Image (cartoon, rainbow, N blue to C red):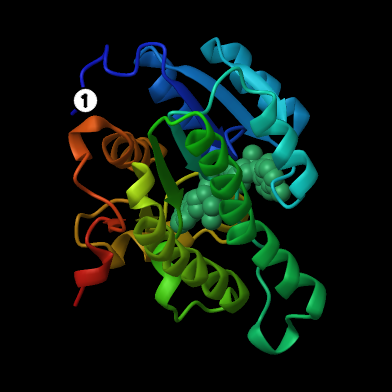
Amino acid sequence: MPTASEFDRQLVVVTGAGSGIGAEVAREFAGRGARVVVVDSAANLAHAVAESIGATAVVTDVRDRAQVCSLMADLDQAPDILITSAGGAARRSALDVDEALFADSYQLNVGGFWRCTQEAARRAIAEQTSLSVVNIASSLYRGPATDLSHFAAAKGASVTLVRCLAQELAAHNIRVNAVVPGPVETPATARVWDDNPDARSTMRAKIPLGRIGEPRDVANAAVWLASGESNWVTGTVLRVDGGLDVAD
Ligand SMILES: NC(=O)c1ccc[n+]([C@@H]2O[C@H](COP(=O)([O-])OP(=O)(O)OC[C@H]3O[C@@H](n4cnc5c(N)ncnc54)[C@H](O)[C@@H]3O)[C@@H](O)[C@H]2O)c1
């Protein structure tokens, strides 16, 4: 793993850092000496996480181009690292997904990654600095995904976009990779699983490594993909799923 000093003074922007996986990613980088910008649309969450790890909070809705432009323009330099973890979607059966939910899932899960990466890349190119981007997608990105077809489709598009951007931006010394997590214990999954007492044990039973993931599992992968230790890696899709993809 990268050493504690590797990220000293580096500027790391983490979206969706007010909760769950994004918060753990932000905490991990801050603990390794990075200057972390905690980005979230929920002001209370962004400020609480930033305060707890000695980072800066910026309240931004990644669905909004103007807000993302302000976020990137107001940084004191181009970011060295961008982690896009803002995402999620309400559960709805495929036949009941309406135009609004479908569009919003795209705006957040692929659009948020797209516009943050585009604006960060423009700034890095203008300042002739390198940039490493890690998109937190989902192991559902290839489907099927009961009651989450709109989410899986958007995450699938985001993984395709990771590969496209990796190819187009490599000449600018910009790397773009994806982590695709399996089921991870976070406030988002607790909201679903807490309503169903069997949900966790059913899920655990499907995972070859015998446990549900922790945010730390995903953060460790994101840190490695963002770091110089992976500097010949771009356009890759790293599964962090306890072996779910190779389950019987
Ligand atoms: N938890 C899992 O099992 C799991 C599995 C696969 C993928 N993921 C993905 O990992 C990422 C993080 O998930 P999590 O479980 O930590 O969720 P979470 O709900 O705990 O955290 C997501 C954060 O994103 C923020 N956010 C939502 N919409 C936003 C917007 N428009 N602009 C800015 N911030 C916004 C929320 O306020 C929240 O703080 C998501 O992209 C999710 O799809 C999670």
**Corner quadrant of residue 17:** top right
Q: Residue at x 68, y 75 (%)?
A: 92
Query: Please, is residue 47 above or below residue 14 in the view?
Result: above
Is 156 situated left or right of 114 in this image?
left
* Residue position for label 1: 2
Q: Is residue 4 left or right of residue 92?
A: left
Expressed as whole percent of the image width and height from the top left, the position of residue 31 reads 38, 15
Q: Quadrant of residue 246?
A: bottom left
- Write the residue at 27% across / 17% down: 6
Q: Count how many numbered circles sit on residues in the image.
A: 1
Q: Disc 1 beta carbon < 8 A from ligand 1? A: no
Q: Position of residue 134 (x, y in %)?
A: 41, 45
Q: Which residue is at the front of the view, 85 or 123?
A: 123
Q: Nearer the viewer, residue 42 or 183?
A: 42
Is residue 136 positioned above or below 202 on the image? Answer: above
Res 40 quadrant in image: top right
